[in-house]
Image (cartoon, helix red, strand yellow):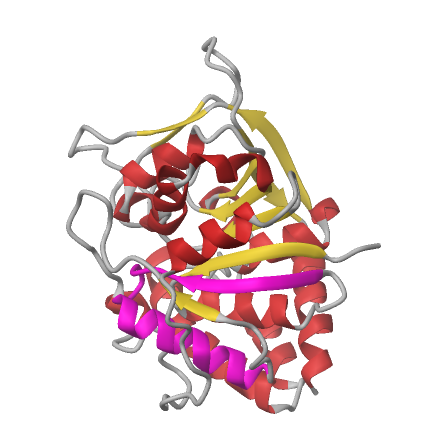
């Protein structure tokens, strides 16, 4: 089977960092055309550096990295250092990576890459605010037929919000961009808090990462020990949810997830509910379905897949 051509758009973030390790450990399944970065969990100059660090840890200097937008389309940037630490990937040693950032802007790269691709051939995997993806669509709408699907992490329905009472962080940071992506007309799969909150890093699962006994395993443990401290207290849960790796796990093993075709709209007007994802899960309106909404994951299978792939670095 031919590998999937993918572009990853991210804002590391400990969970983005582990998502990158999972994707980079799967060269038979993924031809990673590039990794683009956006401001989100931390400002852009940190997300692009963190991405280069993770590619070095993974031993993948071959994957080009591009910096994108440093703020949302219309709103002031909101970051999450209270969750991820001042570096975004607190928990590991931070250094200046030798992998260089590509000079081209992320949006220009995506336009050029997609315009040179065949129809239905490239999958986009955004795990941060959707600013870069929306900006690419606006700049060159002719890219749309080339996109096979978009698999993103964002939004919430039954879980409410993790940034406001009704909004998940990625969507809240740039709701205008999210609404553009929801209506781009391409196949869309969403991994929301509804599913990611089922993928909890319990103490037993953290011990599995310790037993990897490798530099990558040690980095994952450091990242997760820091990441666990915030969400475990916030949610009074067994551990922090691994949000962003759910996107790559879905592409590797979609059978681990249950989902449903729904209409999904993003609130862009009300400050009270800004960034809310209104999911017509029971089709109570006549709005057409525009996304596959994931709502359940086999958590044990998810962590088995993650451990198995991270073992490849050993």
Give the image location of residue 155, x and y in percent: 41, 41
Specify whether residue 201 is in view.
no
Against 147, residue 100 (above or below) is below
Residues 158 and 146: in front is 146
Q: Is residue 44 magenta?
A: yes
Residue depicted at x 44% and y 35%: 141
Residues 92 and 24: in front is 24
Residue depicted at x 46% and y 31%: 184
Q: Is residue 13 magenta?
A: no
**Bounds of the magenta span?**
30-58
Residue depicted at x 31% and y 34%: 276
- Residue extending furthest right? 1
Against 89, residue 153 (above or below) is above
Against 162, residue 28 (above or below) is below
Asked whether, in this view, residue 46 is left or right of residue 286, the answer is: left
Q: Which image quarter is the C terminus in?
A: bottom right
The image quarter containing residue 9 is bottom left
Residues 77 and 48: in front is 48
Give the image location of residue 151, x and y in percent: 55, 45
Residue depicted at x 61% and y 48%: 117
Give the image location of residue 216, x and y in percent: 58, 85
Specify whether residue 108 is in view.
yes
Asked whether, in this view, residue 43 is left or right of residue 294, the answer is: left
Q: Which image quarter is the N terminus in?
A: bottom right
Residues 123 and 239: in front is 123
Give the image location of residue 43, x and y in percent: 25, 67
Q: For the image shown, how many numbered marks are present on the structure? A: 0
The image quarter containing residue 10 is bottom left
Asked whether, in this view, residue 217 is left or right of residue 235, the answer is: right
């Amino acid at each position: 089977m031919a590998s999937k051509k993918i572009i990853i758009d991210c804002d590391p973030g400990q969970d983005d960092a582990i998502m990158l390790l999972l994707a980079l450990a799967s060269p038979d399944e993924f031809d990673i055309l590039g990794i683009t970065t956006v401001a989100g969990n931390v400002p852009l100059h940190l997300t692009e550096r963190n991405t280069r660090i993770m590619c070095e840890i993974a031993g993948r200097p071959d994957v080009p990295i591009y910096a994108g937008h440093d703020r949302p389309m219309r709103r002031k940037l909101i970051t999450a250092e209270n969750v991820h630490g001042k570096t975004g990937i607190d928990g590991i040693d931070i250094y200046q990576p030798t992998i260089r950032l590509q000079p081209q802007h992320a949006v220009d790269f995506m336009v050029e890459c997609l315009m040179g691709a065949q129809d239905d051939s490239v999958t986009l995997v955004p795990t941060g605010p959707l600013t870069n993806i929306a900006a690419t669509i606006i700049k060159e709408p002719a890219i749309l037929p080339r996109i096979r699907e978009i698999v993103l992490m964002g939004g919430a329905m039954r879980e409410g919000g993790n940034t406001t009472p009704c909004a998940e962080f990625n969507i809240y940071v740039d709701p205008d961009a999210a609404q553009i992506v929801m209506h781009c007309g391409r196949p869309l799969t969403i991994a929301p808090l509804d599913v990611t909150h089922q993928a909890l890093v319990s103490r037993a699962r953290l011990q599995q990462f310790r037993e990897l006994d490798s530099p990558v395993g040690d980095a994952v443990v450091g990242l997760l020990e820091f990441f666990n401290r915030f969400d475990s207290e916030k949610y009074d849960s067994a551990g922090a949810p691994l949000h962003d790796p759910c996107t790559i796990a879905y592409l590797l093993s979609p059978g681990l997830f249950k989902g449903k075709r729904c209409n999904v709209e993003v609130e862009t007007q009300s400050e009270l509910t800004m960034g809310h994802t209104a999911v017509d899960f029971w089709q109570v309106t006549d709005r057409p379905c525009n996304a596959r909404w994931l709502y359940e994951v086999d958590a044990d299978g998810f962590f088995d897949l993650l451990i198995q792939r991270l073992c490849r670095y050993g």
